[in-house]
Image (cartoon, rainbow, N blue to C red):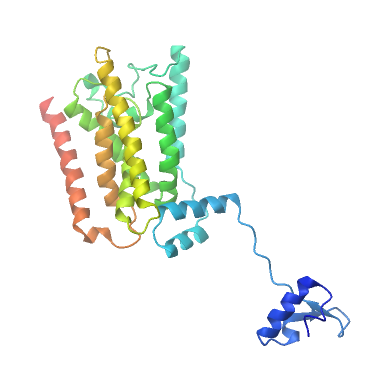
Amino acid sequence: MRCQDSDSHNESFQRLVATMSAESPCSSYETDQGSTSTLRPRLLPRKRKPTCFRKMVRYIAKKYLTSESDRQYYADRYTCCPPPLFVPTVTLAEIGLFTYHCLDAGAISANGPIPVESVLIFRPDKRIQLWRFVSYTLIHAGWVHLFFNMLVQILVGLPLEMVHGSGRIMIVYISGVLAGSLGTSVFDMKAYLAGASGGVYSLLAAHLANIMLNYSEMEFGLLKLSAVLIIASADVGFAVWDRLLERDLLPQISYTAHLMGSLAGLTMGLLVLKNFDQKLYKQCAWWIAFAVYAGCTAFAVCWNVFYF
């Protein structure tokens, strides 16, 4: 009967809710100022439409987190403060240096220019300059190389940084870069090294580790695992083919960093990425990953110190 007395169809539902929940009219309706006979409904607040940023956060939570409670907590609490800084900063630096070298050389191609005289590129005859073991990641040989690395850094590295934090992703990235140069100095001693492939493949492998950690809970876990493996395998195969096709070209650019970066990302991903289900350091996998990375790094350092 109260619903039938309503002057507006929008108000009738509110009256029905008040009646069915045994609320008194005074608690659900307000009177106009100066009048006690006219009832004015107090409408419930409308649910706000989510913004594009909030939709993106929910999408990332759905793809990178496991349990529904973690996804909801992350989607509600993430404010992008502090924002992800590491991946955007490295990406801009790599694009800026590539642009500078192209302008300096006066040319650009799919495989060049290669700034072999740069103080940042890794060279076997300059390995005493220790910063080259890390700084080579800022140099790229051609726009194809740059485009793929930047694409993976943004599509994979940025969401990982938003979920796991800049500090953890920086550790994974730098560990892959360092593993790439150390592995090249051991297994491909005459090759030069340029590009962010070591860091990029460490991010790819870290994402693989994230899937492995939470495989049973992640949506489309098998599909994601297959996609990462296909992308990584295709790029490694292209790098090997390009090296064999131009094996007489000097200087030779190593592809070992792809493999070493992947190994570093897989082990460091198990070490430092958040596991939302359990404490990984209590498991044997954590200690195995730590022993593998520490042992390989120590061997490569000793090789460079005592062999050369």
Q: So how many labels did they put on this image?
A: 0
Q: Where does the image place residue 227, in percent across and percent down from the top left?
A: 36, 42
- The residue lying at 17 percent from left, 34 percent from top is 300
User: In the figure, is residue 172 to the left or right of 1?
Assistant: left
Residue at the (44%, 63%) spot, across then down: 68
* x 74%, y 80%: residue: 15
**Residue beneath the point at 34% across and 50% down:** 222
Choose between 233 and 208: the one closer to the eye: 233
Q: Quadrant of the N terminus?
A: bottom right
Measuring from the top left, give residue 172's x and y in whole percent: 32, 43
Locate residue 202, reporting x and y percent: 31, 40
Q: Where in the figure is residue 253, as x and y percent of width and height?
A: 28, 21
- Position of the C terminus, as image quadrant, is top left
Residue 253 shows in this picture = no
Relative to 117, does residue 207 appear above or below in the rendering?
below
Work out whether 44 lies above or below 176: below
Residue 11, located in which quarter of the rendered image?
Answer: bottom right
Q: Nearer the viewer, residue 91 or 75?
A: 75
Q: With respect to residue 4, does 237 lie above or below?
A: above
Residue 194, by quadrant, is top left
The image quarter in which residue 201 lies: top left
Q: Nearer the viewer, residue 233 or 96?
A: 233
Asked if residue 237 can be seen in this view, the reply is yes
Q: Is residue 222 left or right of residue 128?
A: right
Viewer-proximal residue, 305 or 208?
208
